[in-house]
Amino acid sequence: MTTSPETHSLNRPEDVLAYIPHALGFQPRNSLVMLILERNALSATLRVDLPLLGPGADDTRIAARHYLGILRKVQEATAVFLAVYPPECADPHPGPLPYSGLVAELGDRLRGAGIQVRDAWLVGPESWYSYHCQGPGCCPEAGHPVPELALTETHLRLVVAGSAPTHEPWDGSGAPAWVNRGQIRDHLELMLARFAGPQRHELLLRRWGDLLAQDPAAAERRMRSDAVFCASLLATLHEKPVRDMLPFLAGHGLRPAVCALAETTADATPGAAAALFSGFLLGHSELAPDWRRLDGFWYLLRDLLGVAAGADEAALLCLLAWIEWARGRGSSALALLGGCLAKEPGYRLAVLLRQLLEQGEMPDWVADKDRAWHPEAMPAASA
């Protein structure tokens, strides 16, 4: 679920359908997308996989009940737009639209819960149709052309703002290699052989804290220009207590992270700092994450993929996945975890995070517009 800024005017179906890939970051397929409104303001965008429906009505009822349960997490929801992106490659033939039964069942349940269905559409590769059409005066037999969505003001405005949806969720591949990659990895091997151990955990954590205190562009220049410093950042990813602490460091600051690290690595019973840390990682926090620092952290992690390999690359992909999950972009998080496990099968953190996502867990703050992440244009990856 992606929480949306309230500056988008979505008065026409074309504007809504043009907005969806930008909200998700990719073009959905085999998906049901729900744009959730609080009164007349767009609140969040939720994407779920379409169900495998059998010939009977039970599967449809079960799926609709499940979707309603997810949407209820946005407690102030008053209305919703529905968009179905079928898995088939071809546009539908004349006749009843695919998933009509699911849309009708879900619509009935939403209205029963006091949530208005503003409109619902089927979106194929070339054409889109409204499920609410009452005759040929609404949707032509061949549907409305999808390519024209790229000409809407909504799409063009978002492109100018820096949004560039991809065809598939990014799996972490394609990062360009740094010119000094070999030098950095040589330093990393020496560090892992000589300096690993708990005595260095706080030092490594503080190095990340110093980096995150800088502007992301300045921090990137430091990483790229200082091979020894960059190697120490990668070494951090091989120390599991520090690796796991990094999202908390970015989201809540250095001092709470240092306290939590001390409590989680000590023999004594963990205290309040450790509890705050573990709750934050599982998405349970009354405080709003520091999204400016987390966005900067994501930017640096993405850049480090150009020098990473093996276990440190797997750790980077997991951390990127956690941030995407924290943002409410579960599909993007799963794609990154899939990319991680394709390269490092059985990597424990990726397995655990994927289980968390597949259970449908979402952070508490995702459904709270005051604490949730709001999409902004991110810096382009460095060449």
Image (spheres, rainbow, N blue to C red):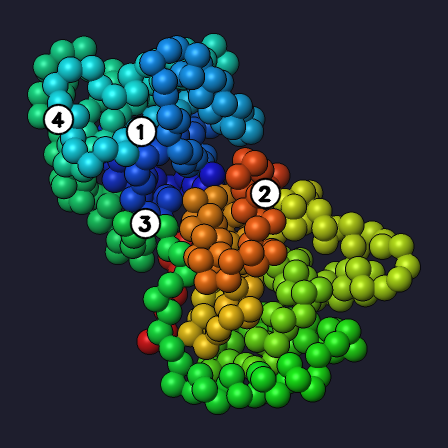
Residue 168 - label: 3
* Tag 4 residue: 143
Pointer 1: residues within 10 angstroms few (<14), some, or many (20+)?
A: many
Up the image or down, 275 lies above or below 257; here it is above
Q: In which quadrant of the rendered view does residue 121 lie?
A: top left
- Look at 42% across and 51% down and name the residue there: 335
- Looking at the image, residue 205 sits to the left or right of residue 70; the answer is right
Gap between marks 2 and 1, in whole Å?
26 Å
Q: Are marks 4 and 3 in contact (CB under 8 Å)?
A: no
Label 4 sits on what residue type?
Gly
For badge 3, the amino acid type reads Glu
Among the two numbered marks 3 and 2 on one chain, the one whose residue lies closer to the N terminus: 3
- Badge 2 or badge 4: first in the primary sequence: 4
> Of tags 4 and 3, which is closer to the observer?
3
Q: Which mark is residue 356?
A: 2
In terms of secondary structure, where does tag 2 sit?
helix
What's the amino acid at mark 2?
A: Leu
Residue type at mark 1?
A: Ala
Mark 2 and mark 3 in contact (Cβ < 8 Å)?
Answer: no
- Tell me, yes or no, if residue 359 can be seen here: yes
